[in-house]
């Protein structure tokens, strides 16, 4: 009976892994081939027109993607050291596999559950918090550079901001801080977690781990935003570096505030990018082509790479912490 039960568990585990991989591949392909904002053939024509596919450019873009994910893996290796010492290889496996699981789940919830599978049940609560801490650090880096970018744009350009749009932007920027104050003031719990409990968990993590997490998150932000800038240069957008990079920073902060599935990230980011770069007279087709290219490089390719680790996952071998 136990043998039958074990075989059944193995079968269902295999089916589940295959379904996760197929779902991830489908969502990635659907995003690339059926983008609602731009025809796929127009996207390819743009890449060919501006020689994005040249050997040198492809190498530079791929290297930036690899370095971006190198620091994401370092970030998780650093965070997970609060539970156990992880090798870079193990951290890469956990980061990529969990990212694949997160592609088709709202607000990357699948990432939390997938990372837990590599640890014993006793460590799950810590892993969930550490993953939350890593994502929060990334959001903090986005806020820091994003606010600086928006302020620079507003003070450098005579922007025709209607009252409603100005209020919307201010609301988006202040929203998380207001939410934090309300939750703390009225002791509101979110899925069983209170602000006080989150603060206690935060203080239990060493300062060294916390600062390294913020450092890696900041480096990551600067890498993928400059990948965006590099594509702007390839598309022959002749604007000062300070204006372009500030617009990129502003795009990311506005897009990051709205919770969504990763598959819709390019859609949300594309909308904000078209709006912000419109003030710099950058053609919409160029902006959307760049947003989709960045999505493929930093979301699509890692999602496909993570599929390999999802299929190789074995609970008995990984859940050892």
Image: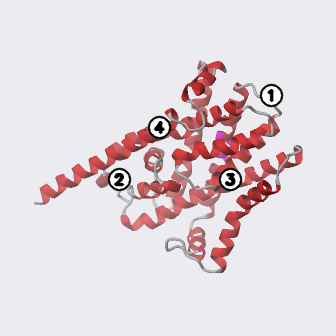
* Circle nearer the N terminus (2, 1): 1
Lower sequence index among marks 2 and 4: 4
Q: Which label belongs to residue 141?
A: 3
Q: Which residue is mark 4?
A: 30
- CA gap between label 4 and label 1 equals 33 Å
Going from the N terminus, do you reach mark 4 or mark 1 first?
4
Q: Position of residue 14 (x, y in %)?
A: 27, 47
Provide residue 258's location: percent of width, then percent of height: 62, 55
Instruction: Decide if residue 94 is on the left or right side of residue 172.
Output: left
The answer to whether mark 3 and mark 1 are in CB contact below 8 A is no
Q: Residue 244, image x and y in percent?
A: 77, 37
Pointers 3 and 4 in contact (CB under 8 A)? no
Quadrant in the picture for the C terminus:
bottom left
Camera-near label (3 vs 1) is: 1
Residue tagged 1: 238
Query: For the residue labelled by badge 1, is the local secondary structure a helix, a strand or a loop?
Result: loop
Q: Residue at x 63, y 80 (%)?
A: 186
Q: Is residue 78 magenta?
A: no
The relative height of residue 244 versus residue 185 in the rendered view (above or below) is: above
Q: Is residue 221 magenta?
A: yes
């Amino acid at each position: 009976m136990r043998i039958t039960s074990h075989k059944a568990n193995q079968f269902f585990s295999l089916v589940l892994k295959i379904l996760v991989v197929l779902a991830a591949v489908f969502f990635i392909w659907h995003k690339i081939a059926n983008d609602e904002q731009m025809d796929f053939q127009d996207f390819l024509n743009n890449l060919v027109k501006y020689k994005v596919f040249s050997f040198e450019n492809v190498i530079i873009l791929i290297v930036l993607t690899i370095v971006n994910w190198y620091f994401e893996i370092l970030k998780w290796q650093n965070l997970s050291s609060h539970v156990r010492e992880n090798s870079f290889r193990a951290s890469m496996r956990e980061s990529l596999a969990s990212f694949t699981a997160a592609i088709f789940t709202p607000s990357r919830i699948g990432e939390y559950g997938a990372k837990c599978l590599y640890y014993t049940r006793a460590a799950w609560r810590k892993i969930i918090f550490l993953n939350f801490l890593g994502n929060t650090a990334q959001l903090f880096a986005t806020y820091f550079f994003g606010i600086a970018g928006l302020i620079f744009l507003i003070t450098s350009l005579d922007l025709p901001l209607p009252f409603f749009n100005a209020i919307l932007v201010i609301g988006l920027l202040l929203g998380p801080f207001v939410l934090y104050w309300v939750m703390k003031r009225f002791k509101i719990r979110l899925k069983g977690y209170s602000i006080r409990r989150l603060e206690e968990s935060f203080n239990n993590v060493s300062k060294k781990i916390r600062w390294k997490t913020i450092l890696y998150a900041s480096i990551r932000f600067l890498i993928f935003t400059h990948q965006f800038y590099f594509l702007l240069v390839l598309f022959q957008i002749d604007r000062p570096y300070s204006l372009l990079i500030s617009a990129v920073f502003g795009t990311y902060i506005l897009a990051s505030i709205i919770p969504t599935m990763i598959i819709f990230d390019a859609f949300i980011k594309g909308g904000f990018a078209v709006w912000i770069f419109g003030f710099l007279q950058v053609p919409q087709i160029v902006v959307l082509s760049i947003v989709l290219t960045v999505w493929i490089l930093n979301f699509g390719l890692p999602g496909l790479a993570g599929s390999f680790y999802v299929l190789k996952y074995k609970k008995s071998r990984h859940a050892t912490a």
